[in-house]
Structures are given as structure tokens and as C-alpha cells.
Amino acid sequence: MEITIKIFRYDPEKDERGHYETYVVEGDENDRVLDVLELVKGKTDGSLAFRRSCAHGVCGSDAMRINGRNHLACKTLVRDVGANITVEPLLGLKVAKDLIVDMEPFFDNYKKMLPYMINDSPLPADGKERLQSPEQRARFDESTKCIMCAACTTACPSYWASDEYYGPAAIVAAHRFIFDSRDEGASQRLHILSETDGTARCHTAYNCTEACPRDIKITKAIGEVKMAMITGKLD
Amino acid sequence: MGLKRNVGLMTALRYKGQGPFLTYILHRIGGLGMAIFVTTHILATFVEGKGWQIGDIINDIYISPFFQVFFLFGVLFHIINGMRITILDLFPKLILYHRQAIMIEWVIFIVVYSFAAITTITTAIARL
């Protein structure tokens, strides 16, 4: 089948502003949008720039706007978006080239969440490991699935307004540790999230939940963090 | 180096965020409508007090059935959507059912708004 793909193009060495270029390629309805981009880059225009790595929805490299909405290009089939495809870079981050955005502000916000285990207590008597029940593990299971693709954060209207807002992905990262029974840094993270740029900026637009390629219920996770801040309980 | 990150209003509105994003946008339009109404009301009262004729003109605008039907849309949507947001904020576990919550919200809104709009229009017609 014939696939028409309109791609946002921007070369910082040549262009003052971005523009769109349209390519027509022969493909299959079961191709992924990433395959179509590879076809364009391989056969038509080698200067096209986009990120990709595992190509199986695990690394989170190829998040982009496909037909006006954030998706992973490697998890989006042509048959699901139609033969006329528009591909644009993520919103709210600087465009470095074509579909590549500067992820630094996104990762800076992630780092602010102290995304590592904090536990200064002595090890258990056997000196081996801090045990956790299946129920305790289930409490934060969903937020461990995040692949840091930025599809959620760059779909958030509050983040579009200001990248000072930590954003949904960073809050999900905080959620993963706040509700981990082995961690002792919940109060530090809740304090960080109670600042002006924290959870108060979430206005429940649900764009993050809709955009997440891992089906994480992000708004629910943010809601749980909000409740933990209000009640001081991690139940 | 690179394009600016700023997202313009039109770019933001073009994002295809589906049903929940639509309620987010309408909620803000409703809030803006209320702010405009209150401002207009205060302004009209002030200039009427001064005896300026412009006060009557502003009054005519906001008591007109067209304005009221538009205003009712904004206010009622803002209230009903706000109630949904509050309930889901207080009970995060219910957020799993946000799509169903939005459908219920639309049903309630359509019933309440239809009643209010029809009442406003029939009252206006009766005054003719």
C-alpha cells in the first residue's frame, strides 16, 4: 500500500524555523511508523534525524507526536493511524533536529525525585536482604514499568506552560520509591513534590495516562502521591 | 541551538488528547466565562452608578438570552466537571474509571443544561 508521511523537519545549521516535508513510500498496513521512518531515511532522505534503539517498546527512544498525539513509533502500526501520517517532535522540549528533542530538562526533573533507594537502617539479622511481601511489591508495581520515554510529560498542558513543573514521569518515578516498603526517603520526596512545581500543577487533564505506551495509570499514581501528601499515610 | 520549547495556544489545542482533554479545555473556557461575567457585572453596576449610558448597554448584553445560554454552558460545565475532579482527587482509586466518570458527567451536564437553556429561552420568548 502507498503511505504518505508528512514529517516535521528542522536543521539547526540551515533552518531558521521548522517546516514539513511529505514523502510517499510503499509499505504494509502492518508496518510500524518506525518502519516507515526507516524507509524514508534509508531510501529517500538520509538526512532525516530521529531517535530509535530497541524498536520494541522497551527503550523509550522513539516517542513522538503521530497524527497529533504522543506515541512510540515502534509500537504504532500504520493500520491504526491510517495511510496519511503526520509525524512531529514531542511538545514542550527544544527541537535539536527534525524529530529529536533535547531531553535534558526532562531528565533534570527526574533526578530531582531522588530516583534511588534511600535506606540507612542496618540490614536484617541475616545480613542478606530486605524482604518484601507480594502485596507490598504490588503497591508500586505499575510505576516500575516506566521507560522514561517522555510521552506523558510532553503531553501535559501544565508542562507545556512551564518546564519548571516536574511533570508526570518524574512524579511516577517518585511514586515508585515513595510506596516501596524498603525505602525510607518518602518524606524527602513528598516534601520536594509539595513545592510549587510539584503535584499541585497537575490539573488532571489525563493526557499523560492516554499517552503512556506502557499503560501506566499515571493520573492515579499522581493522585496517590497527592493523598499521601495530605494524609501523611502511605497505605 | 535548536528551536524554542514554547508551546503556543493553537499548537496546544491541536493536541489530540481525546475526551478528558476536551473537558480540561471546556473547564477553562467555563472559568473564563465566569470571570468575564463577574467583571462585566461589576463594570455595569459601576458605570450605571455614575449615570453613564454605557452601563445600560453592558446590562443589555449580559441579560440577553443568547449571553445567558452561553454563560450557563460555561458555569454548569465548570461546576459539574469540578465536582468530578474533586471526587476523583479525593478517591484516587476511582481514577481507574475516569472515562466512565466523564461519560456520567456528560449525561448529567446535558440533562441539567438542557433544562436550564430551555427555561431561559422559553422565558425570553414569553417576554416578547
Image (cartoon, coloured by chain):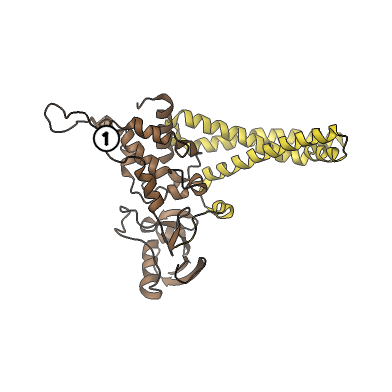
Chain colours: A brown, B yellow
| Residue B109 coordinates in the image, percent (x, y) | 62, 35
Asked whether A186 or B22 is in front, the reply is: A186
In the picture as drawn, the residue positioned furthest to the left comes out as A126
Q: Which residue is mark 1?
A: A118
Residue drawn at the location 40% of the way across and 71% of the way down:
A40
Residue B31 appears in which quarter of the rendering? Answer: top right
Residue drawn at the location 40% of the way across and 47% of the way down:
A212
- Which corner quadrant holds the C terminus of chain A? top left
| Residue A140 coordinates in the image, percent (x, y) | 32, 35
Chain letter, disc 1 residue: A
Residue drawn at the location 45% of the way across and 37% of the way down:
A199
Residue A109 in view, yes or no? yes
Asked whether B2 or B62 is in front, the reply is: B2
Q: Is residue A113 left or right of residue B26?
A: left
Q: Amino acid at mark 1?
A: Ile
Residue B66 appears in which quarter of the rendering? Answer: top right
